[in-house]
Image (tube, grey):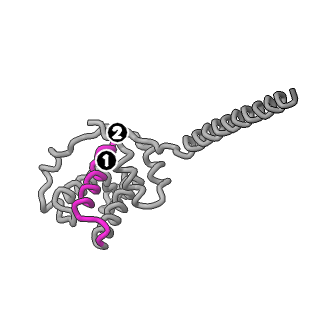
C-alpha cells in the first residue's frame, strides 16, 4: 500500500510539474508577442493625389531650366518646383524691391536638403548616379504633387526626422501618390 501511494504521489507531482512548465511557456510567448507588437509601431503612410506634370515640363526649355548634375529632366522639375513653391511679393507698392515667399517651407527645405545629400553621396561614391537620379526624381514628383494638398501631418513628420536618409525614406516609401 505504501508503494502504491508513493507511486501515485510521484506520478501526480510529475504531471503537475509538466503542466506548470507548459503554462509558464504559454505565458512567456504571449508576453513576447505583445511586446513585439508594441515595439514594431508602424510609421504612418501618407496618401496624396498624384499628378502628371509632363505637359508643363514640355513647355520648359533647357535655357529656362539650366543644367543639373542628375540630368535635364531633373533640371526641368526643379524649375517647376521653384515656380510652384516660390513667389515674389512687393514690399511696398510702387517700390521695386521684392521679397521671396516660399509656400510650405518645410517641404521645400526638405527637398533641397535631400538634393544636397544625394549629390554628396554620389561624389563620395556611396551611391550611383542612376540610383540618386531615380530617388531625387521620386522626391520631386511627391513635392510637386502635394503642393495643393493638406500636408500638416506630413510636414510634422518631416520636422520629426533626424537626418536626410530618413527624409528620403519618408518621401519615397511612406507616401502613396494616387493617380
Helix, strand or loop for the magenta stretch, by majority: helix
Residue 7 x, y percent position in the rendering: 79, 31
Q: Around disc 2, counting alpha carbons within 10 Å, would you say few (fewer than 14), some (14 to 19), or many (20 or more)? A: some
Pick the front one: 7 or 173? 7
Q: Which residues are magenta?
A: 125-148
Q: Are marks 2 and 1 in contact (CB under 8 Å)?
A: yes
Is residue 130 magenta-colored? Answer: yes
Q: Which residue is mark 2?
A: 48
Q: Around disc 1, counting alpha carbons within 10 Å, would you say few (fewer than 14), some (14 to 19), or many (20 or more)? A: many
At 12% across and 57% down in the image, what residue appears?
Answer: 61
Residue 28 x, y percent position in the rendering: 64, 41
Q: Which residue is mark 1?
A: 142
Q: Is residue 46 above or below residue 171?
A: above
At 35% across and 65% down in the image, what residue appears?
Answer: 117
Q: Quadrant of residue 166?
A: bottom left
Along the polypeptide, which appears first: circle 2 or circle 1?
2
Is residue 91 magenta-colored? Answer: no
Amino acid at each position: 500500500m505504501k508503494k502504491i501511494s508513493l507511486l501515485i504521489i510521484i506520478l501526480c507531482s510529475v504531471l503537475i510539474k509538466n503542466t506548470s512548465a507548459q503554462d509558464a511557456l504559454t505565458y512567456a510567448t504571449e508576453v513576447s508577442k505583445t511586446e513585439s507588437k508594441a515595439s514594431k509601431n508602424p510609421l504612418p503612410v501618407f496618401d496624396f493625389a498624384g499628378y502628371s506634370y509632363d505637359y508643363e515640363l514640355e513647355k520648359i526649355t533647357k535655357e529656362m531650366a539650366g543644367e543639373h548634375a542628375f540630368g535635364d529632366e531633373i533640371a526641368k522639375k526643379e524649375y517647376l518646383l521653384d515656380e510652384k513653391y516660390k513667389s515674389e511679393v512687393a514690399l511696398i507698392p510702387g517700390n521695386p524691391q521684392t521679397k521671396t515667399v516660399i509656400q510650405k517651407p518645410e517641404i521645400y527645405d526638405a527637398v533641397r536638403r535631400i538634393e544636397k545629400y544625394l549629390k554628396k553621396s554620389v561624389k563620395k561614391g556611396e551611391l550611383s548616379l542612376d540610383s540618386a537620379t531615380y530617388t531625387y526624381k521620386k522626391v520631386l514628383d511627391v513635392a510637386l504633387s502635394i503642393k495643393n494638398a493638406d500636408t500638416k501631418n506630413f510636414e510634422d513628420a518631416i520636422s520629426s526626422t533626424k537626418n536626410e536618409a530618413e527624409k528620403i525614406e519618408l518621401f519615397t516609401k511612406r507616401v502613396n501618390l494616387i493617380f
